[in-house]
Image (cartoon, helix red, strand yellow):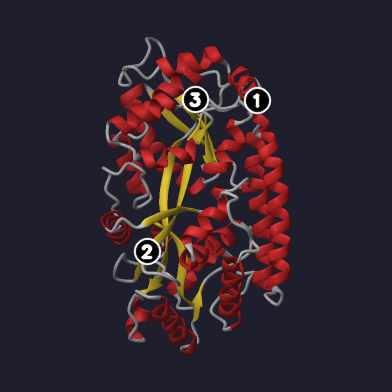
């Protein structure tokens, strides 16, 4: 899509009104206010949305009315369809990176540049996240959550087996061997719903070679590189040694499996995953703990991040007011109840994460200047990501021919990157 066509689709007048709308974010236009119709796919987070909305109401006159479509596939289809109507929802939960760009390039999203820059200026937002919400010259989203992928583990199991959180890859493999010898599956992973495949692929690839993984996500590296072959060889050996749960395991069962000692470790985001463990009665730092997955090669630690976002449909009937209200979304008073509900996860660096394990790792990542790498699910064009994760899911179930898998992945990458480049010209 040409830049001129994009601006026409987005509506030049509407963008100008929205950019002007963030001056004086604490006030609301006379007679305006109400509930922001917020479409999302996380029903269990409803109380957190409402708690944040109650504080947003005090700041802007607008509360949050969450409306949930729990099926992820149906959710994406519904949102894409509604963006083309004359009355889409006021606010939408959506992915960052290429998933956000995929919507922004249609002209269906309102520009939130002023809300972004105002939040950065107040110290509410790290501007390094800007690229995850940018398209062309504008910013089209704000972070809803930010988490870091780590290895949760059962403290009682580790204590009983005399294990400590590993600092090196060899120590990590020793932990896997010790768990396996105790008839405990070391790592809970699955191919079901495909997005969990992207989670573990991101973590393992980042541990193996973060620089190559970043280049791969940007189409500056290939699935036929030596790094890809080495990564798949490592993954194949881990599967063959029985380090992973069966590929048809259900991710929703992993918290209970960790508690019941059926798995020793669970790769998942800190902090909102803590909520699932706490719901089972597990205590942070006592019953469960977590560590950064050690690096396979090199000493410089890296970690995968997941950042989900909020976007405002351009055609929303309340677009100007909601865009203005978003200038206060990252205000600490709004973020604290939201972050508390999830035991952490706010992207505002001034808002403390309440879960002990999450708080410690958040501090460690920032203190030690750990390299932060975007999760694969958001870091490449969506059709490519879906195809890649489907193939890798098949590999998890049948890891006998990694060379053929890599050849298929490379073909998909060449094709989908060609489509993406053509579509964004």
Q: Is residue 356 above or below residue 162?
A: above
Q: Which residue is mark 1?
A: 2
Q: Label 3 neighbourhood size at 10 Å, few (<14), some (14-19), many (20+)?
A: many
Q: CA distance from mark 1 to mark 3?
A: 17 Å
Q: Which residue is mark 3?
A: 111
* Extreme-bottom residue of the structure: 181
> Residue 173 appears in which quarter of the rendering?
bottom left
Q: Are marks 1 and 2 in contact (CB under 8 Å)?
A: no
> Residue 253: image x %, image y %?
53, 66
Q: Is residue 337 above or below residue 220?
A: above
Question: Which residue appears at 27% of the width and 56% of the height?
Answer: 363
Residue 68 visible to an observer of this rendering: no
> Residue 289: image x %, image y %?
34, 68
- In the depicted view, which residue is nearer to us: 49 or 2? 2
Residue 268 visible to an observer of this rendering: yes
Which tag, 1 or 2, sits closer to the chain's start?
1
Q: Which residue is mark 2?
A: 301
> Residue 174: image x %, image y %?
42, 84
Q: Label 1 neighbourhood size at 10 Å, few (<14), some (14-19), many (20+)?
A: few
Question: Which residue appears at 45% of the width and 27% of the height?
Answer: 112
Which tag, 1 or 3, sits closer to the chain's start?
1
Q: Name the quarter where the N terminus is drawn.
A: top right
- In the depicted view, which residue is nearer to us: 408 or 197? 408
Which tag, 2 or 3, sits closer to the chain's start?
3
């Amino acid at each position: 899509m040409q830049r001129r066509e994009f601006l026409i689709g987005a509506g030049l007048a509407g963008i100008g009104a929205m950019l002007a709308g963030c001056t004086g974010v604490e006030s609301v236009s006379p007679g305006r206010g109400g509930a922001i119709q917020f479409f999302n796919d996380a029903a269990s987070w409803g109380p957190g949305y409402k708690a944040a909305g109650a504080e947003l109401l005090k700041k802007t006159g607008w509360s949050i009315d969450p409306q949930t479509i729990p099926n992820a596939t149906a959710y994406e289809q519904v949102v894409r369809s509604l963006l083309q109507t004359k009355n889409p929802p006021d606010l939408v939960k959506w992915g960052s990176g290429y998933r956000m760009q995929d919507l922004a390039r249609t002209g269906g999203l309102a520009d939130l540049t002023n809300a972004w820059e105002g939040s950065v200026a107040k110290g509410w937002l790290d501007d390094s996240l800007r690229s995850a919400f940018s398209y062309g010259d504008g910013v089209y989203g704000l972070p809803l959550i930010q988490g870091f992928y780590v290895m949760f583990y059962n403290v009682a199991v580790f204590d009983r087996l005399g294990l400590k959180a590993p600092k090196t890859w060899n120590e990590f493999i020793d932990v896997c061997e010790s768990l396996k010898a105790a008839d405990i599956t070391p790592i809970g992973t699955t191919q079901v719903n495909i997005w969990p495949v992207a989670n573990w692929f991101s973590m393992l690839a980042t541990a193996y070679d973060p620089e190559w993984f970043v280049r791969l996500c940007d189409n500056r590296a290939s699935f036929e590189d030596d790094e890809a072959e080495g990564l798949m060889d490592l993954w194949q050996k881990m599967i063959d040694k029985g380090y992973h749960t069966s590929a048809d395991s259900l991710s929703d069962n992993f918290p209970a499996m960790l508690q019941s000692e059926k798995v020793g470790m669970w790769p998942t985001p800190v902090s909102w995953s803590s909520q699932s463990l706490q719901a089972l009665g597990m205590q942070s730092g006592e019953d469960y703990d977590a560590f950064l997955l050690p690096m396979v090669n090199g000493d410089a630690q890296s970690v995968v991040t997941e950042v989900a976002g909020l976007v405002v449909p351009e055609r929303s009937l309340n677009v100007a007011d909601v865009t203005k209200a978003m200038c206060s979304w990252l205000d600490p008073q709004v973020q604290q109840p939201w972050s508390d509900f999830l035991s952490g996860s706010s992207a505002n660096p001034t808002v403390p994460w309440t879960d002990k394990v999450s708080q410690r790792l958040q501090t460690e990542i920032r203190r030690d200047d750990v390299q932060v790498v975007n999760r694969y699910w958001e870091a490449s064009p969506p059709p490519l990501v879906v195809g890649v994760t489907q193939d890798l899911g098949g590999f998890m179930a049948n890891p006998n021919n990694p060379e053929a898998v890599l050849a298929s992945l490379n073909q998909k990458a060449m094709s989908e990157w060609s489509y993406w480049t053509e579509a964004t010209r």
